[in-house]
Image (cartoon, rainbow, N blue to C red):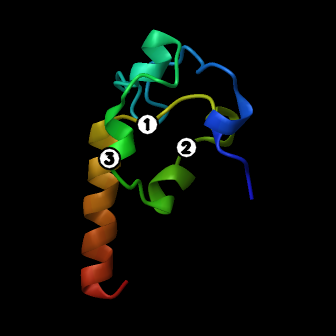
């Protein structure tokens, strides 16, 4: 299993674009340069299906945005509800 980015890096990468939609990802650590900055992503669970959509070349280099995370969570819930 891959080690979380936070465990591999001393400081966050300055990647502020979502690798899925190209919009701003709202990553506070990427902007501040410190993992001590509180971020929206620590309060949500991003489905594995959403993370799997990140292009291989960009995995571990940038966070996805809240909109993509929430849309993926809604889709995962709908799939679970429909038995897919």
Q: Does 5 sit left or right of 52 as displayed?
A: right
Q: Residues within 10 Å of mark 2 (few under 14, many from 20)?
A: some
- Give the alpha-carbon distance from disc 1 to disc 3, as whole Å: 14 Å
The residue that label 1 is drawn on is: 64
What quarter of the picture does the N terminus occupy? Answer: bottom right
Q: Residue furthest bottom?
A: 83
Per the image, label 3 sits on a secondary structure element best described as helix
Is tag 1's residue or tag 2's residue first in the polypeptide sequence? 2
Is tag 1's residue or tag 3's residue first in the polypeptide sequence? 3
Rendered residue at 31%/59% (across/down): 73
Quadrant of res 23: top left
Rendered view: 78 above or below 37 = below
Answer yes or no: do the residues labelled 1 and 2 have beta carbons within 8 Å? yes
The residue that label 3 is drawn on is: 43
**Which of the two residues, 79 or 7, is positioned nearer the viewer here?**
7
Is tag 2's residue or tag 3's residue first in the polypeptide sequence? 3
Q: Nearer the viewer, mark 2 or mark 3?
A: 3
- Give the alpha-carbon distance from disc 2 to disc 3, as whole Å: 20 Å
Can you give x and y, in whole percent of width and height, for residue 51 in the image?
A: 51, 51
Q: Nearer the viewer, mark 1 or mark 3?
A: 3
């Amino acid at each position: 299993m891959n080690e979380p980015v936070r465990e591999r890096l001393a400081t966050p990468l300055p990647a502020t674009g979502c690798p899925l939609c190209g919009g701003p990802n709202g990553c506070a650590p990427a902007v501040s340069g410190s993992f001590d900055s509180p971020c929206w992503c620590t309060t949500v669970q991003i489905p594995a299906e959403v993370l799997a959509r990140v292009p291989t070349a960009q995995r571990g280099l940038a966070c996805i945005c809240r909109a993509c995370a929430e849309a993926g969570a809604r889709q995962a819930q709908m799939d679970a509800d429909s038995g897919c």
